[in-house]
Image (cartoon, helix red, strand yellow):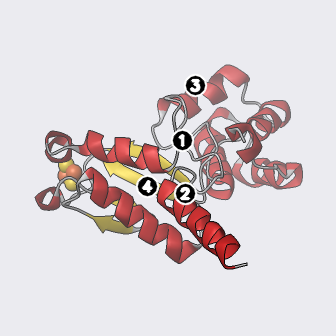
């Protein structure tokens, strides 16, 4: 499954309602994009096209604003967000190792991708999250967790996934356990 399948289905009525309520001129670009991202978690191309077609904001103005501000995402986002802190303290204490371990257990192998193919988690790099004393740190949804090795990061994600009933596409230990249970089952029958 590619991230293509994670694209949101945009409701044109909703986007047109925002244009009516928020405005159709260039000053409305930021609040319109915020409304779209608030609804879909990122800026779906279909929603951008509707704004360009139904407002006075042209494509270069809208995409200019969308790419200028770091708050806006152009790619689909997973059901859960893992923010890996890459502020100075976390960076020097091994933030990269957290990314490597998380990408591994989520089977994110393409450098251009940051979301697991099943839409479960998105891994994003962020600036200092304000907990430098527990560097390296990450934030899963709203929980800040620190003092992590790469293995710890995987453990934390597995625990979170279990609580949310999410599958981790790269979690081979789960697959091995299932295969072992199957073979035990076959041996018994
Ligand atoms: S640098 Fe990571 S919490 Fe401050």
Q: Quadrant of residue 181?
A: bottom right
Q: Secondary structure at mark 4?
A: strand
Q: Quadrant of the N terminus?
A: top right
The disc placed on residue 39 is none
Q: Is residue 82 left or right of residue 2?
A: left
Q: Which residue is at the far left?
A: 133
Distance in Å between CA atoms under marks 1 and 2: 26 Å
Query: Mark 1, mark 2: which one is toward the viewer?
Result: 2
Q: Secondary structure at mark 2?
A: loop
Instruction: Where is residue 12? Give x, y as percent.
Output: 87, 48
**Disc 4 target residue:** 82
In the image, 30 versus 73, the foreground residue is 73
Residue 86 seen in the current view: no
Q: Is residue 30 left or right of residue 87?
A: right
Residue at 70% in and 36% down: 25
Q: Is residue 165 left or right of residue 126?
A: right
Instruction: Where is residue 159? Give x, y as percent.
Output: 43, 71
Mark earlier in primary sequence (2, 3): 3
Distance in Å between CA atoms under marks 2 and 4: 13 Å
Q: Quadrant of the C terminus?
A: bottom right
Mark earlier in primary sequence (1, 4): 1
The disc placed on residue 64 is 3
Distance in Å between CA atoms under marks 3 and 4: 27 Å
The disc placed on residue 168 is 2
Mark earlier in primary sequence (3, 4): 3
Mark earlier in primary sequence (3, 1): 3
**Disc 1 target residue:** 72
Residue at 68% in and 40% down: 3
Q: How many residues crowd mark 2 within 10 Å: few (<14), some (14–19), many (20+)?
A: many
Residue 167's place in the image compared with 49, above or below, is below
Query: Mark 1, mark 4: which one is toward the viewer?
Result: 4
């Amino acid at each position: 499954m590619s991230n293509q399948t994670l694209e949101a289905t945009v409701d044109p009525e909703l986007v047109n309602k925002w244009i009516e309520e928020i405005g159709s001129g260039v000053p409305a670009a930021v609040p319109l994009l915020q409304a779209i991202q608030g609804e879909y978690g990122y800026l779906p191309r279909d929603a951008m096209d509707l704004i360009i077609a139904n407002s006075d904001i042209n494509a270069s103005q809208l995409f200019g604003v969308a790419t200028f501000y770091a708050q806006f995402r152009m790619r689909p986002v997973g059901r859960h967000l893992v923010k890996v802190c890459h502020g100075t303290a976390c960076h020097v204490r091994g933030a990269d190792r957290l990314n490597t371990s998380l990408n591994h257990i989520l089977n994110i192998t393409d450098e251009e991708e940051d979301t697991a193919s099943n839409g479960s988690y998105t891994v994003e790099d962020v600036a200092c999250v304000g907990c430098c004393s527990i560097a390296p740190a990450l934030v899963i949804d709203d929980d800040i967790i620190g003092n992590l090795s790469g293995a710890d990061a995987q453990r934390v994600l597995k625990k979170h996934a279990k609580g949310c009933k999410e599958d981790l596409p790269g979690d081979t230990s789960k697959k091995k356990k299932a295969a072992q249970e199957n073979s035990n089952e076959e041996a018994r029958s």
